[in-house]
Amino acid sequence: MPIQNENIAIIFEEVADLLEIEEANPFRVRAYRNAARTLRYLSRDAYKLVAAGFDLTTLPGIGKDLSGKIQQIIKTGKLDVLDRLHKDIPASVEELLRLPGLGPKRVHILFHEMGIKDITALESAARKEELRTMPGFGIKTEQRILDAINSKKSSEKRFLRSFAMAHAEPLLKYLKQGKNIKHVVIAGSYRRGRESVGDLDILITISGSSSSSVMQRVVDYEETDKVISIGSTRATVILGCGLQVDIRILAEQNFGAGLHYFTGSKTHNIQLRKLAQRQGLKINEYGVFLGNKRIAGKTEESIFRSVGMPYIPPQLREGSGENEAARNNQLPDLIDLSDIRGDLHSHTIATDGQASLKDMALAAKKQGLQYLAITDHSKHLTIAHGLGTDALLKQIDEIDKLNEELESIKLLKGIEVDILEDGKLDLPDALLAKLDLVVGAIHSHFNLSREKQTKRIIRAMSNDYFSILAHPFGRLLFEREAYDIDLEKILDKANELGCFLELNSQPKRLDLADNYCRLAKNKGVLISINSDAHSQDDLKNMMFGIEQAKRGWLEKGDVLNTRPLKQLEKLLRKK
């Protein structure tokens, strides 16, 4: 398959990490990181631009040298400088970088000063309390490293949903183009909308009796890297990205039962089977049976109908009350992407975004949105070139002028303001008062105690101009654990103050988690599902947030930005 922008960005990030371990020139390190960011936010495929003769040096942060390196990766799939770095630094040392809290500077100390080359040696040193004496570590860091190692062990071989989707959807399209194919559906945790997946379960039905052509098509797929097993109705392959795919061919009459069974979850299936048993029925992957008579199984709807229940959406099938709700006709009417009227968290080139105000506005309009909040970072986040007073005032004027010429879309004036360690906001109230909304976020001091972190957030929310708490737990999936807060106390305070919480749709965040969305719903606190877009294409992140919201039982009325603009403005003014 052609080299994707994300693949190039990953290579550049790896080069930057390894250069930093070697203590290379920081400007050189930064150049690779900036180039990776540009590629991630690029709206077109770099390989297509190169094929069309586009001058890559016109892109932000891409000079002649990096342009040449991008072209080398597109042409060969490799990069000479990375190959050289791999000779100097073992791959096992790179694995240390994947642990939350271990940046290149600390890995440099571990590798060069302590001779630690892999996670096993790191864990041993931490258990022997040898890390705490090294510069930049300490007792708390040592314990966090042990916690991160344990967390890594429990999440081995899982992939972000967005990563899995990038490889699953092309495979799905490819399989559907085969001869005699009737149904092709991805089941499992992917279908349930989970944040990460371990593998893909693909179910197929065919017309006719021969399945050999389907299995050969799986083997011939250009991304199939390794065939683990193959038979007449089942196959397991590994894609080049490392994702395992299990293919099953089902009989048409069993398709609904098989789809339900392989979608899961295990807990949901067990609960449904027990319910069926109480009614004298048996449910398995082949259908629903009354004695030896098969009474349902061709469709999923028939499975649920056989036990007197309405259809339960896959996102709810976690054994967390959905079967009981279905029996009592109390299933939620889940939110849909079409219910979203606007996006209340986005960035521009004024800070760490990749597009102008107008470009973001037009992209939002194209997405069918009625409004888009521009919430660039505040000055405390220097790494993102955050805005100070003068820069924000300038942006406010620019938004006002742009709104005069825009049609069918309105830009809201906002800021993603840093919540400082003491709970104060990074900008003065007199400036915040000029905005339509204020999105507060924590970007530092993640390791405060539960009590201090909770007090910090509540103090910030108590500010007269605070609107939405962004990515409330600050987690980055597989990279950074959530900080410790008392969410129930925060939700109670949000209800009292008229604040809202965000469900951040960035695939690495998906913060709030589904169970916390459900808690917010029960507390009556509205959730704002936002893309946190840093480019036009990032506005599409919303679909990942919607999946998370469905898993959290959220309905249209539970979500702030399903409101038309006038209703939204009224809710924001209440604060």
Image (cartoon, helix red, strand yellow):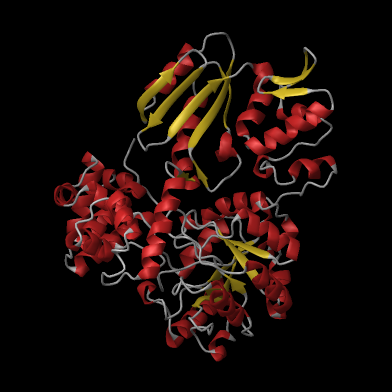
Q: Is residue 311 above or below residue 347?
A: above
Which residue lies at the image location 49% right of the left edge and 73% below the top edge? Answer: 442
- In this rendered view, identify the residue nearer to me: 560 or 511: 511
Q: Quadrant of the C terminus?
A: bottom right
Q: Is residue 397 above or below residue 115?
A: below
Residue 480: x percent and y percent?
44, 60
Residue 107: x percent and y percent?
26, 61
Dividing the picture into quarters, in which one does residue 269 lie? top right
Q: Is residue 408 above or below residue 460?
A: above
Image position of 139 (left or right of 266): left
Task: Look at the image and tell me whether residue 331 can be seen.
Answer: yes
Dividing the picture into quarters, in which one does residue 18 lie? bottom left
Dividing the picture into quarters, in which one does residue 112 lie? bottom left
Task: Look at the image and tell me whether residue 407 can be seen.
Answer: no
Residue 409: x percent and y percent?
60, 65
Residue 120: x percent and y percent?
30, 49
Which residue lies at the image location 17% right of the left edge and 46% below the top edge? Answer: 83
